[in-house]
C-alpha cells in the first residue's frame, strides 16, 4: 500500500486529502497538523481501503511515495527541511507561494540541490492554458484578469507564469496601481491592480476588486480574442456554449501522483521551473515596499 503524507490540514490540505479519499485505490494516509482538534477529528474518518494515521508532529525515519506540503508559506521551509532530512521521500508537491524570503530559497536550494528534480509545485498555469487551448502568441497581446478582492498576491504566480509562457520575454512588474495591505492573518495582499509588461509589447492587467469568488480572464490580440469566466470550478467561454471542468486539488492531486508513478504527463511544474518567477516577484515587492512581503 502506498504511503502518502499531507502536512497542513487547512483548506488546501483538506482538498488534497479529499482527492485520495475519493480514489478507489489503497493508501496509507499520514496526516499532520499543529491543531490537535483537527487531528482528533481526522482520526474518526473511516473509509474502505484507506488507513489514516494522524498526528501533530511530523515523522522521522519514514518511507513515503508522495508528500504534500500544504502549510502556510512562513512555515514551509522548516517543514520540508524536516521531511527531506529525516525521511525517505520519492516525490514532493509544494503549495505556492514557495517561500517568502530570497534567503530561504538560497538555503533550501543549497541544502537539497540533488533533491530538486523530484519536487513539484501546485501552479496550474500550463494546465489552464491547455484547457482553453491558448498557445504562445506570435504577436503582441493584452490580457485582463479580474480576481476577488484582496486575492491578487496569493494568485499572482499563476498569472505571472501564464504571461511568461505566452509571451516568452522578460517580464516587468508595475506596482504603481497596487495598494498593499496587511491582512488579519499576518500575510499581505491588496487591492487595485498589478500590470505585467514585456519587450514584445504585450501586457497583462491583474485586478483585485471583485466581490464574487470567481475570476475573469480576457485575452485580446489582432487575430484572436476570448473572454472566460471561471465559476464553481467550471470554465465558461463567452463565444462558445460548452463548459469545461477546471478541477482543483480536491480532484486532481491523486491523478497527478499516479501519473508521476508511471512517468506519464504531469500538469504541475517542477520546482526549478517556478522558482525563478517566485524570486522575481519577491524582488519587485521588496524593492517597492522596502520590507519583507509575506504571500499566503
Image (spheres, rainbow, N blue to C red):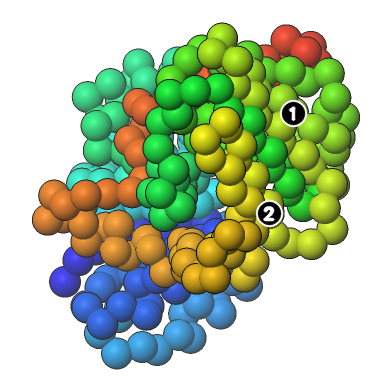
Image quarter for residue 182?
A: top right
Q: Residue at x 24, y 32 (%)?
A: 117
Mark positioned earlier in the residue sequence (1 or 2): 1
Q: Which image quarter holds the N terminus?
A: bottom left
Q: Position of residue 72 (x, y in %)?
A: 60, 45
Residue pointed to by mark 2: 215
Q: Which mark is residue 50?
A: none
Q: Is residue 205 visible?
A: yes
146 on left or right of 8: right
Q: Position of residue 223 (x, y in %)?
A: 52, 35
Q: Position of residue 55 (x, y in %)?
A: 46, 65
* 185 in relation to 187, above or below: below
> How many numbered marks are there?
2
Q: Residue at x 35, y 26 (%)?
A: 272
Residue reaching furthest left?
A: 262
* 10 in relation to 227, above or below: below
Residue pointed to by mark 1: 194
Q: Residues within 10 Å of mark 2 (few under 14, many from 20)?
A: some
Q: Mark 2 and mark 1 in contact (Cβ < 8 Å)?
A: no
Q: Residues within 10 Å of mark 1 (few under 14, many from 20)?
A: many
Q: Residue at x 22, y 61 (%)?
A: 258
Q: Position of residue 130 (x, y in %)?
A: 38, 49
172 on left or right of 132: right
Q: Secondary structure at mark 1?
A: strand
Q: Which image quarter holds the C terminus?
A: top right
Image quarter for residue 222?
A: top right
Q: Is residue 101 visible?
A: no
Judging depth in this view, the residue of 16 and 215 nearest the camera is 215
Q: CA distance from mark 1 to mark 2?
A: 15 Å
* 194 in relation to 40, above or below: above
Judging depth in this view, the residue of 6 and 61 nearest the camera is 6
Q: Secondary structure at mark 2?
A: strand
Amino acid at each position: 500500500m502506498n504511503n502518502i503524507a499531507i502536512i497542513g490540514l487547512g483548506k488546501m490540505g483538506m482538498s488534497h486529502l479529499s482527492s485520495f479519499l475519493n480514489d478507489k485505490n489503497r493508501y496509507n494516509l499520514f496526516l499532520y497538523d499543529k491543531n490537535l482538534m483537527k487531528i482528533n477529528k481526522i482520526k474518526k474518518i473511516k473509509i474502505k481501503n484507506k488507513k489514516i494515521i494522524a498526528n501533530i508532529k511530523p515523522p522521522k525515519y519514514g518511507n513515503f511515495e508522495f508528500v504534500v506540503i500544504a502549510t502556510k508559506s512562513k512555515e514551509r521551509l522548516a517543514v520540508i527541511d524536516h521531511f527531506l532530512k529525516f525521511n525517505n521521500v520519492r516525490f514532493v508537491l509544494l503549495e505556492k507561494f514557495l517561500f517568502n524570503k530570497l534567503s530561504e530559497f538560497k538555503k533550501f536550494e543549497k541544502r537539497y540541490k540533488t533533491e530538486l528534480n523530484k519536487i513539484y509545485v501546485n501552479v496550474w498555469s500550463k494546465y489552464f492554458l491547455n484547457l482553453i487551448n491558448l498557445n504562445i502568441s506570435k504577436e503582441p497581446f493584452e490580457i485582463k484578469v479580474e480576481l476577488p478582492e484582496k486575492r491578487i498576491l496569493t494568485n499572482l504566480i499563476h498569472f505571472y507564469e501564464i504571461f511568461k509562457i505566452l509571451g516568452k520575454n522578460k517580464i516587468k512588474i508595475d506596482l504603481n496601481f497596487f495598494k498593499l495591505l496587511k491582512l488579519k492573518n499576518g500575510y499581505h495582499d491588496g487591492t487595485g491592480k498589478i500590470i505585467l509588461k514585456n519587450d514584445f509589447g504585450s501586457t497583462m492587467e491583474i485586478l483585485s476588486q471583485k466581490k464574487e469568488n470567481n475570476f475573469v480572464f480576457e485575452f485580446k490580440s489582432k487575430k484572436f480574442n476570448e473572454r472566460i469566466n471561471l465559476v464553481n470550478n467550471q470554465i465558461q467561454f463567452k463565444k462558445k456554449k460548452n463548459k469545461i471542468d477546471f478541477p482543483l486539488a480536491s480532484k486532481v492531486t491523486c491523478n497527478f501522483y499516479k501519473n508521476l508513478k508511471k512517468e506519464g504527463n504531469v500538469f504541475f511544474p517542477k520546482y526549478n521551473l517556478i522558482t525563478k518567477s517566485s524570486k522575481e516577484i519577491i524582488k519587485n515587492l521588496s524593492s517597492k515596499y522596502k520590507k519583507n512581503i509575506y504571500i499566503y
